Image: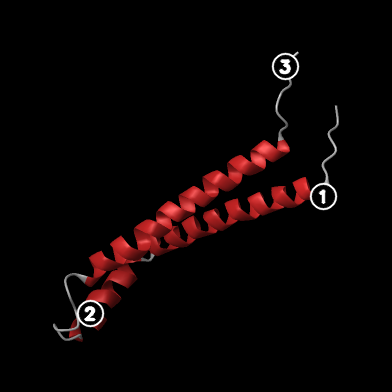
Amino acid sequence: MSVRYDKDTRKAFFKAIGKGLGGASILLALLGFYFGWDGFYYWFYNKLVHIPKEVRVGDPLLIIWLIILFPLLACGIAMLISGGMKAYRLAVPAKEED
């Protein structure tokens, strides 16, 4: 049985696919960051070590992890799952009970 979708359903489907792909691209960027971690770590602790103590409060690398990277990871996972699930619900119609 073929199901014909209207324009709004098709638009919502591609929007959900885009959301899922956006989440996947965030996760791929974080994976690239993970593989380039040695260079980032070297840059952070050898190039930024000359920042005055008054400006640098605490461990700046920990602040980067807590404020930027963990929320990006959570956002990427959430976008990937929600976009994929919404696209799946739009693509696969619900079964009708007899």
Quadrant in which the N terminus appears: top right
Please rate how many residues cluster around mark 3, counting C-alpha atoms within 10 Å: few if below 14, some from 14 to 19, many from 20.
few
Q: Provide residue 91's location: percent of width, then percent of height.
A: 72, 38
Quadrant in which the C terminus appears: top right
- Figure quadrant of residue 25: bottom right
What secondary structure is found at the residue carrying circle 1? helix
Which residue is painted at 59% across and 51% down in the image? 20
Disc 3 to disc 2: CB gap under 8 Å: no
- Figure quadrant of residue 54: bottom left
Residue position for label 3: 97
Q: Compared to 93, does 95 lie above or below?
A: above
Answer with mark 3 or mark 2, whichever residue precedes in sequence: 2
Q: Provide residue 19's location: percent of width, then percent of height.
A: 60, 54
Which residue is painted at 19% across and 69% down in the image? 59
What secondary structure is found at the residue carrying circle 2? helix
Q: Provide residue 2's location: percent of width, then percent of height.
A: 86, 31
Answer with mark 3 or mark 1, whichever residue precedes in sequence: 1
C-alpha span from label 1 to label 2: 55 Å
The amino acid sitting under disc 1 is Lys
The amino acid sitting under disc 2 is Asn
Q: Compared to 21, does 97 lie above or below?
A: above
In this rendering, the label closer to the viewer, 3 or 2 = 3
Residue position for label 2: 46
Which residue is painted at 47% across and 56% down in the image? 27
Which residue is painted at 64% across and 50% down in the image? 16
Toward the top, the furthest residue is 98
Answer with mark 1 or mark 2, whichever residue precedes in sequence: 1
Residue position for label 1: 7
Q: Compared to 92, does 23 lie above or below?
A: below
